[in-house]
């Protein structure tokens, strides 16, 4: 039995699997672009974005009298099924490809057309009844449908990323409350500074990540401006009058996002500025997240020859040669994710810069880099929260002993005995091994009662008057 059907395009005929909903142009892309191994089917929000765009386009064409009612309803029904999660395996093209996204656009056009044909009781490939180009791609070009689909996907993906971020912020806040009475030594330049609490340190982790919620959301808001109706280069050739504004209105109604038509479609078609600034927000998050992971690794270092102020949950044996060794594998893997995100941001920058004249043909690698970053960050945030942060415990006595024996507490004496005398005390403590506390008493600089009050760690955690 024949397992293929023949389809043709301007390059000739090609065999397509008989049961495939995609067609000849998708098959050519499968054959041509064996690049990353990451397929469109791995990015469900992108596929849903394509279906949303095709549904809005069909609705607009119907309302403008270009598509008959029965065909419009079938197209809308097919799109709704894809939005609901069906047929995603029918999107097998590589995310990185030549052609400015044409293969992905045609993949969507062909799948939707063949779903419609099936609903009409026709065979796959009988495109005279529903054509990928003449009906599904009506009044569109890859150059407006494809970037609009990317933006619809990213709007949804951003919601998921922010949700993951909010959860890890809550986990750090919870630890901040748990550790609010754990006195420890703060450090600058890896040297003893002044006392603080472990709770303040973990609350700071939460606060620095919380700042990035507004950055991600504000930058994602730029995705609501789309160039549907621009067709090839922004002039709107082959789109009817009023199409751009009406299609944006329909997209808003379908998605619930405040979608608007770009004021200058010629400018909007090659413009990738929204991707650049959103990617930069993810890079900012990655830099902060990696710094936090560095801190967690330092604070848990040891256990006997390091700081050992906190314990990370033991996740797996750490060495094939050193018995008993347990490594901070979760912060380590999140560090590596952050490096990948930072590198992908550079890819986005280069891809955006490479736009020429009326189109940026590098949008496939640009969109892949951003979507990969979102997926990586979502997974990393969940992993760090579930397998590390929630299980962290404090070594309270270790922290307190470091404060008691630290020369850094001499800073608290500055307002009382002056910087010069404080420096002399610190120097002598370093040279003799004596404590700051004992040296001040030996020299009769302050009474024991006053010294106890000044050097009580709890009095050094916040501003106070002399």
Image: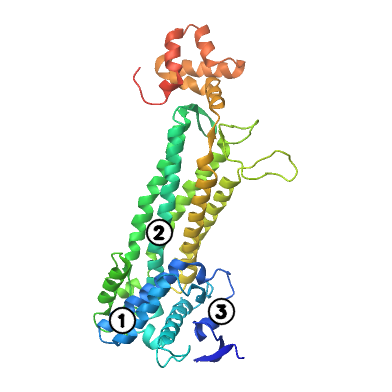
Whether residue 162 can be seen here: yes
The quadrant of the image that shows the N terminus is bottom right
Residue highlighted by disc 2: 158
Q: Nearer the viewer, mark 1 or mark 2?
A: 2
Indicate whether 253 appears above or below 193: below
Please report whichever mark, 1 or 2, sits nearer to the chain's N-terminal start: 2
Disc 2 on helix, strand or loop? helix
User: Gap in Å between the C-alphas at discs 1 and 2?
Assistant: 30 Å
Please report whichever mark, 3 or 2, sits nearer to the chain's N-terminal start: 3
Q: Position of residue 126 (x, y in %)?
A: 45, 92
- Counting labels gives 3
- For the rendered model, the colour scheme is rainbow
Q: Residues within 10 Å of mark 1 (few under 14, many from 20)?
A: many
Residue highlighted by disc 3: 30
Q: Position of residue 370 (x, y in %)?
A: 46, 62
Q: Position of residue 184 (x, y in %)?
A: 50, 27
Residue 119, picture quadrant: bottom left
Q: Position of residue 229 (x, y in %)?
A: 31, 78
Residue highlighted by disc 1: 236
Whether residue 270 can be seen here: no
Q: Nearer the viewer, mark 1 or mark 3?
A: 3
Disc 1 on helix, strand or loop? loop
Residue drawn at the location 48% of the way across and 73% of the way down: 88
């Amino acid at each position: 039995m024949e397992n293929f059907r023949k389809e043709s395009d301007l390059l000739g005929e090609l065999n397509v699997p008989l049961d495939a909903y995609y067609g000849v142009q998708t098959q050519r892309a499968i054959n041509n672009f064996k690049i990353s191994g990451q397929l469109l089917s791995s990015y469900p929000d992108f596929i849903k974005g394509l279906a949303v765009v095709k549904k809005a386009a069909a609705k607009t064409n119907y309302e403008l009298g270009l598509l008959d009612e029965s065909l419009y309803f079938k197209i809308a029904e097919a799109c709704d099924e894809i939005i609901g999660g069906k047929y995603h395996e029918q999107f097998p093209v590589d995310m990185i490809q030549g052609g400015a996204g044409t293969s992905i656009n045609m993949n969507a056009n062909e799948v939707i057309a063949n779903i419609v044909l099936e609903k009409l009781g026709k065979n796959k490939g009988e495109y005279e009844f529903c054509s990928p180009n003449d009906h599904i791609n009506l009044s569109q070009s890859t150059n407006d449908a494809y970037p609009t689909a990317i933006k619809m996907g990213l709007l949804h993906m951003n919601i998921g990323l922010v949700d993951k971020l909010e959860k890890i912020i809550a986990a750090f806040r919870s630890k901040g409350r748990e550790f609010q009475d754990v006195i420890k030594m703060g450090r600058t330049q890896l040297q003893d500074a002044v006392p603080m609490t472990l709770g303040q340190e973990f609350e700071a982790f939460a606060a620095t990540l919380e700042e990035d919620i507004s950055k991600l959301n504000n930058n994602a808001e730029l995705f609501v401006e789309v160039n549907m109706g621009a067709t090839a280069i922004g002039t709107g050739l082959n789109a009817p009058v009023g199409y751009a504004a009406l299609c944006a209105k329909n997209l808003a109604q379908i998605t619930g996002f405040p979608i608007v038509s770009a004021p200058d479609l010629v400018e909007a078609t090659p413009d990738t500025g929204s991707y650049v600034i959103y990617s930069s927000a993810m890079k900012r998050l990655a830099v902060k997240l990696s710094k936090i992971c560095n801190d967690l690794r330092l604070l848990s270092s040891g256990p006997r020859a390091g700081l050992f102020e906190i314990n990370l949950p033991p996740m797996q044996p750490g060495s094939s040669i050193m018995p008993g060794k347990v490594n901070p594998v979760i912060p380590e893997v999140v560090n590596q994710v952050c490096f990948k995100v930072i590198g992908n941001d550079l890819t986005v920058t280069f891809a955006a810069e490479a736009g020429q004249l009326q189109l940026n043909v590098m949008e496939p690698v640009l969109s892949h880099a951003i979507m990969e970053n979102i997926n990586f960050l979502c997974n990393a945030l969940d992993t760090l929260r579930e397998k590390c942060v929630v299980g962290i415990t404090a070594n309270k006595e270790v922290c307190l002993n470091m404060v008691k024996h630290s020369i850094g507490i001499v800073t608290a004496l500055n307002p009382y005995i002056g910087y010069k005398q404080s420096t002399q005390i610190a120097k002598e403590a370093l040279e003799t091994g004596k404590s700051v506390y004992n040296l001040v008493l030996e020299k009769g600089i302050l009474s024991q009662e006053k010294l106890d009050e000044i050097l009580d760690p709890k009095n050094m955690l916040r501003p106070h008057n002399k």
